Image (spheres, coloured by chain):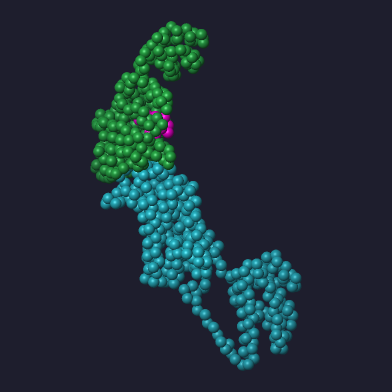
Amino acid sequence: MSKLFRGFTAILYKEFLMVLRDPFTLFFMIFPPLVEMIAFGYALDTDVKHIATVLLDEDRTTESRQFVTQFENTQTFRIVGEARSVTELAALIRRGKAYVGLQIPPGFTRNLNAGRSAKVQVLIDGSNSSIAASALNTALNVGFRNGLLTLAQKIGLRDLPVEVRPQMLYNPEMRSPNFFLPGVIGIVLQIATTFATAMSLVRERERGTLEQLMVSPLSRWGLMLGKLVPYLAIGMVMGALLFTIMRWVFHVPIAGDVVALMVGTLFYVFCLLSLGLLISTRAQNQMQALQMTMMFILPSVFFSGFIFPRETMPEIFYAISTVLPATYYIELERALVLRGASLGDFWFHLVMLAAMGVALFSLCVLRLRRTIA
Amino acid sequence: MIACDNLTKRFGHFTAVDHVSFAVAKGSIFGFLGPNGSGKSTVIRMLCGLLSPSDGHARIAGFDVAREPAAIKPLIGYMSQKFSLYDELTAHENLNFYGRLYGLRGAALRRRYDELVGLTHLAPYLNRRAALLSGGWRQRLAMACSLIHQPSVLFLDEPTAGIDPVARRELWDLLFEFSSQGMTLFVTTHYMDEAERCSQVGYIHLSKLVVCGEPDDLKQLPVVNPPDTRRIDVTCEHVTVGLQAVRQLPGVRTATVFGQSMHLLVEASLSEDFIRTELARVNIPHADIRPIAPSLEDVFVALTNNRNGET
């Protein structure tokens, strides 16, 4: 072993033994992230589909039924029941039985056939804005299209004059898990890994074994690297596990190179573990280490682009986002997983992660004073 | 082997170690005594390179502790107050780890390992986790760990605190054996009987080294044996009551309880019969009085009082 990393293999030997010997820490490193991943995966589904809808059909003709079918065919609405009056319709929405009420008044077909405007009323519960917006757009669209088709038929056209054919690239079904899960993996990895190294060194300080290490010829680089590597191995196993869950439990296809994805993950986890070590050079006890770890997790959740797009953030938050490893990792992940980008397209992100990792690691080595007051 | 020259450590405005100078010869057992908070551990921590001195120098085997830590580290062993071991690891793994930490590998590690296991009788406990060892065995394991690299100097910070008397005795037997092999030992302790066994003792009080020397020499110091006085041991019932009584007597300089008896420093003219009569007046009929030589404790009490009197 070179002089710079003196004692590295000894620390490595000990850390591996201790990690395996301490099922408690291992459990808390692996289990909560898996639960978080699965919970996030199901809970962060913002797709608006099959909105509960009640129907009040006062016309009761073939045409009115056809119109209702068109509504249902959008997949946005799902008829969950029928009301007998407008009052009942409104009451059902108020009681939360449905988000949308569709009222087809008597004379719908008569007006339609007579060339008069056939009126349809749609009641929407606006309290949930994303559901309301989706319901509004779809309802207007159905009516608009229906009207246009009727007009077109009247003047003898078979098709609409203008037909927009949108094509979704990379996430054709616009499933929100595809967008969120790579981000969730980034956040979950941060929670699990940062705290592991932060705790491991603080525990040595609390027990006094750190003093024992400092009396020995062990080098600071050797100590820090020996502390980091076992958790890097665990972090990589976890990363692989999380991507497996993403792929086979939530059916998010990985479009890009899996090897590239794992290289990115390696750099990211190295960054986070170094951050944990840096925290541990500051924290006096495990409680402090835990609080400091949490302090670094919140910005990653809010400013990394995990939930809110970075581009629309106020400048200050955007500035914060540029120094978060999570920002670069999540962007890298989305590019590789969803868009099938190659590492060549995103080398900047990789370089940033590597640079942050090396900087954080060097900083914590320099901060770990040979003398412990 | 160890030489301190005006070694000083300040923490802010507080001076924890104030211009301490002493030298320890190779192969000797240096007992370092003093009340809690007097600066004992701070001195050890500076010598081990865990703290850098604010002022002054210290050398171990000729190397400066502040400037040449890399040369010193392989030479010293340190056993802290807490016997810092890895609780999750077995005794075997702890020993192995410390061996590797000092660069021992393969056959060399194996040989040293077997030697220490034989020396400390740890064999039956090797596969037990450190957390499950009793105080005495933890201490032995900690000691074996701090010796694995065959240090020339071993620092022990209160190695016998909280250890049963038998284990204490055995530890000291080991220390003598190491010392006879040429190892220099630096031991802090609160026990006077341990101090008596050291080849050299230093007493630190309020951050200053009050005295340093061989126990027998210290007992001859004039401040310990003021002219026209003698030391006597008074063994009697109700020692605490007796102590109050004799402290009132003219001619009694100091009086301290030692177990079932009291040690008095009295003026030479004070007669033993007079003390007996005075004790009888407080219902202590039989007092056994005999002359004694000063103990180390007497030395430290005298020196502390003397110093307090000066300031």
Provide the letter of the chain coloured cyan.
Answer: A
Q: Which residue sits at x=40%, y=36%?
A: B16
Q: Give x and y (percent) for residue B206.
A: 41, 31
In this view, B18 is above or below B276: below
Q: Give x and y (percent) for residue A107.
A: 74, 82
In this view, A224 is above or below B16: below
Q: Residue B262 occupies which quadrant of the picture?
A: top left
Q: Which residue sits at x=45%, y=7%?
A: B274
| Span highlighted in magenta in the image | B32-40
Can you say which quadrant of the picture contains the C terminus of chain A? top left
In the image: residue A251, left or right of residue B231: right
Q: State the count of labels.
A: 0
In the image: residue B281, left or right of residue A153: left
Q: State the residue in front, A156 or A94.
A: A94
In the image, farthest residue toward the bottom: A156
In the image, farthest residue toward the front: B311
